[in-house]
Every structure is written in structure tokens, then in C-alpha cells.
């Protein structure tokens, strides 16, 4: 129901709005770096992540640095920088700081630029966070997922519940003023009371931002196989709705504002990188399986790099083409994606300049899912039907 497409860096491809193509070489652009390694593979995970260790980790790091150095977009300022994965903090302090140095050399930033790294609470400590802070990261996004030991074991997470508080403390001690926690709900066997406890525990850690996603069962995962055999005891839709509404209540009571279907922030702490996606702006992607979307004289192209770390590294080393997929976006693609992404935001979707189906608009309004005229936003009821609303609005 609430797809976890930003959890652990699964950056699904949005599309940018029309703009003056001649400006695109100098405009700041969002920069994403994919680090594909994890200590182990979580049962629900369909992201481009690999439980690999040894020489391949350094080889892939070096290849990603080389990709950044050779980028045709080198020199273009970074609007935001985001390291996702995989688990970026699975890399050593030396590897992750070398990667960031390559990004900053290629894409200048200002002191205000948001520079985020995702982090697994089981792979960090104060020295690593200090090295990252010194290198230029200023925002940490911790994949907490749950504070219930049983949930963490069932999910296949490598960290224990108390690692999250330790990681938040380590990040604060290292000087990170901007910390996000990712939590998942609708987990196997999870009850509303358990979810409420998770929210209370998370909020007690005083994060600046919370990303709260419902578990979805993805193809080619251990959870999918268990689900097919009827072995996952998932909460039904009504319970999921109850959990989601509890999240909205609890975060509001804690002074956080919901600004997107699944994201909540203290004042001024919205994730600027993800806002670039939701506003359908251009972004660069570096690393194995990274997705980018760039405008050029021939239009807009979304690309995906080769996914496996070995194949990707070999291609960088032999100077072969890195893209395994290229999608030349049509105006219809862009229109749909701008609707699909923009409607997720609480501020709503400005419909001027978009192709909108008038009968779908009327239907969504009649059902009580949207409100507003020039700028339409989901109602509280409509937040449960975000995808349906996007499909209704698109011609
Ligand atoms: S930590 Fe788990 S969910 Fe996140 S990318 Fe790695 S395997 Fe996937």
C-alpha cells in the first residue's frame, strides 16, 4: 500500500519537468551515489544490494570514483548529494570519504548543500561518523525499521534494537544536526500496539525526520516465497490504515509535519534530495545500478547503470558503456510521472501545464480523495489511494 521506494536507497526513476535545455549544463543538479554492498540480504529486499566482501568492495569503490571523474556532467554544481544503497556505511571510513571527495571535486557544493548518507545502525560508530562529518556529510539517514527484536530477526536485519539509539547518539556526538530514521510498518505478525511502541521509541530519540513505509512484498525475495506458501502473517488493509493514521497522529503530537505520503519532518528538515525527485527534477546517478535522469539537446533520458558490482567495475575499467538501460522519456511519460510524484506531496500538485483527465479529476473529487483547484492535494482519505488518484488524473 505504501511502497518503500526510498528505504535503503531504492531510488525509483522519476522524470523532470520541461525546461530550457540550454541551462541544464550549469544548473545545480541532485547527485545520487549507489553503494551496493550490505552485511547480509534482508528478507524483503529487492534493491540492488549484495552481501559481498573482500576485494570487490574496494574495486567497486575505485570504479565508482573513476565513473565520477569521467562524468560528462563534471563541473555542474550539486544541488543535493545522497549516498544510498545497499548500505553506504558498510564501506570503510576511508572508502566512503574517498567517494564523497570524488563527488565534491566533480560537483561543487555550498555550505548549505544537503549531503546525506544512509546508514545501517549495525555498521557505524563514532569514529566512522566523525570521518564522514569531516568529509562533508551533514545528514544521516538510519535504517532503524523496528525496535522490536523479533521484527528485526524476521526482517533479516543485522542490527539489534538498541543499536539504533547508539547510532543516533554517535551521529549527534560526531556533529550531525540532521538525522532521519526509517521505520517500517505492516510487518509480519505486527500489531497496532507494537507499531505504536516503535513510533514512541523513535520519537523519543528526537530525530529531525522520519520516513515511515509499509512493507510491500516484492518479487524474487525471501518474503515473496514465504508469502506464496502462506507463511507470512501480514496485517490486513484495515490494520495498515490504522497504523498509518497512528503515525500521522504521533508525529504531529511530536511537532513534526507530514510533507509527503510517507515522510515527516521537524521545521526546515524536509529531505531536499527526495524533494528533487518528487518535484520531478533531473538527477545524476553514479555506481552500480544507479539511476539517473538528465536533460540534453535531444530531450530527457533516464538511464540505469549495470547492476552487478563485478560487471559494472569491469565496464568502468575497460571504458565500456555503463548503461544497461536507457529510456527516452516521452511527454506522456513525463506528464504521468509528474502527476504520480507531485500528488504525494502535502503541498499538492500544481496542475497548470499538466495534461489532466477532466473526468478522472471529477471522479477523484467526488470520491473525496482530492481538494483544491489550481493546486490539488490529497485529502486525509485520499492518502490511502495515492496511486489510484494518479491513475485517475493522468489522461
Ligand atoms: S540493508 Fe537490507 S533492505 Fe537495505 S539494501 Fe541492504 S539488504 Fe536491502
Image (spheres, rainbow, N blue to C red):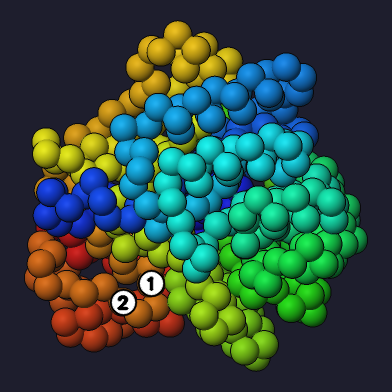
Numbered circle sitting on residue 345: 1
Query: Which quarter of the image is occupied by the C terminus?
Result: bottom left
Residue at the top extreme, as displayed: 318
Q: Is residue 65 visible?
A: yes
Q: Secondary structure at mark 2?
A: loop
User: What residue would you read off at disc 2?
Assistant: 348
Residue 34, quarter of picture: top right
Position in image of residue 379 (x %, y %): 37, 82
Q: Residues within 10 Å of mark 2 (few under 14, many from 20)?
A: many
Numbered circle sitting on residue 233: none
Position in image of residue 72 (x %, y %): 31, 32
Q: How many marks?
A: 2
Please state if 325 lies on the left or on the right of 179 as rendered.
Answer: left
Please state if 6 lies on the left or on the right of 8 as rendered.
Answer: left
- For the residues labelled 2 and 1, the Cα–Cα distance comes to 5 Å
Does the Cβ of the disc 2 residue fall within 8 Å of ligand 1? no
Q: Secondary structure at mark 1?
A: loop
Q: Residues within 10 Å of mark 1 (few under 14, many from 20)?
A: many
The residue sitting at 75% across, 72% down in the picture is: 202
Q: Verify CB contact (< 8 Å) between mark 2 and mark 1.
A: yes
Position in image of residue 194 (x %, y %): 79, 70
Please state if 104 lies on the left or on the right of 252 as rendered.
Answer: left
The residue sitting at 13% across, 64% down in the picture is: 354
Q: Along the line of sight, which residue is nearer the eye, 210 or 383?
A: 210
Residue 204, quarter of picture: bottom right
Q: Is residue 381 visible?
A: no
Against 73, residue 28 (above or below) is below
Q: Along the line of sight, which residue is nearer the eye, 249 or 264?
A: 264
Q: Along the line of sight, which residue is nearer the eye, 284 or 51?
A: 284
Against 198, residue 90 (above or below) is above
The residue sitting at 50% across, 68% down in the picture is: 112
The residue sitting at 74% across, 67% down in the picture is: 175
Amino acid at each position: 500500500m505504501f511502497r518503500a521506494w526510498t528505504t535503503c536507497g531504492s531510488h525509483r526513476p522519476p522524470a523532470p519537468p520541461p525546461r530550457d535545455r540550454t541551462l541544464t549544463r550549469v544548473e545545480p543538479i541532485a547527485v545520487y551515489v549507489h553503494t551496493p554492498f550490505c552485511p547480509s540480504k534482508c528478507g524483503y529486499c529487492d534493491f540492488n544490494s549484495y552481501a559481498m566482501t573482500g576485494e570487490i568492495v574496494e574495486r567497486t569503490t575505485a570504479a565508482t570514483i573513476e565513473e565520477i571523474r569521467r562524468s560528462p556532467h563534471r563541473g555542474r554544481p550539486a544541488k543535493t548529494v545522497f549516498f544510498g544503497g545497499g548500505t553506504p556505511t558498510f564501506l570503510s571510513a576511508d572508502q566512503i570519504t574517498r567517494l564523497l571527495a570524488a563527488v565534491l571535486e566533480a560537483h561543487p557544493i555550498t555550505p548549505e548543500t544537503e549531503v546525506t548518507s544512509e546508514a545501517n545502525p549495525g555498521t557505524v560508530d563514532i569514529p566512522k561518523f566523525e570521518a564522514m562529518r569531516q568529509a562533508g556529510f551533514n545528514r544521516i539517514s538510519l535504517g532503524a525499521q523496528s525496535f522490536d527484536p523479533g521484527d528485526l530477526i524476521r526482517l533479516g536485519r543485522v542490527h539489534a534494537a538498541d543499536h539504533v539509539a547508539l547510532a543516533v547518539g554517535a551521529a549527534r556526538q560526531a556533529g550531525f544536526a540532521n538525522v532521519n530514521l526509517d521505520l517500517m510498518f505492516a510487518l509480519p505478525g505486527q500489531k497496532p500496539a507494537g507499531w505504536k511502541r516503535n513510533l514512541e521509541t523513535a520519537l523519543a530519540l528526537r530525530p529531525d525526520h522520519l520516513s515511515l513505509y509499509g512493507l510491500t512484498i516484492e518479487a524474487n525475495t525471501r518474503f515473496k516465497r514465504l508469502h506464496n506458501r502462506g507463511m507470512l502473517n501480514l496485517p490486513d488493509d484495515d490494520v495498515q490504515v490504522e497504523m498509518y493514521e497512528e503515525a500521522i497522529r504521533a508525529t504531529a503530537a511530536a511537532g513534526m509535519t507530514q510533507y509527503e505520503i510517507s515522510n515527516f519532518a521537524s521545521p526546515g528538515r524536509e529531505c531536499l534530495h527526495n524533494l528533487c525527485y518528487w518535484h520531478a527534477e533531473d538527477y545524476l546517478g553514479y555506481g552500480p545500478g544507479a539511476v539517473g535522469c538528465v536533460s540534453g539537446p535531444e530531450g530527457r533520458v533516464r538511464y540505469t547503470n549495470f547492476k552487478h558490482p563485478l560487471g559494472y567495475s569491469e565496464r568502468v575499467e575497460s571504458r565500456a558503456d555503463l548503461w544497461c538501460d536507457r529510456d527516452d522519456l516521452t511527454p506522456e511519460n513525463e506528464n504521468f510521472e509528474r502527476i504520480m510524484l507531485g500528488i504525494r506531496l502535502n503541498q499538492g500538485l500544481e496542475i497548470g501545464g499538466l495534461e489532466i483527465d477532466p473526468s478522472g479529476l471529477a471522479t477523484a473529487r467526488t470520491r473525496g480523495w482530492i481538494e483544491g483547484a489550481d493546486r490539488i492535494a490529497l485529502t486525509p482519505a485520499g492518502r490511502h489511494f495515492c496511486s489510484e488518484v494518479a491513475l485517475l488524473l493522468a489522461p
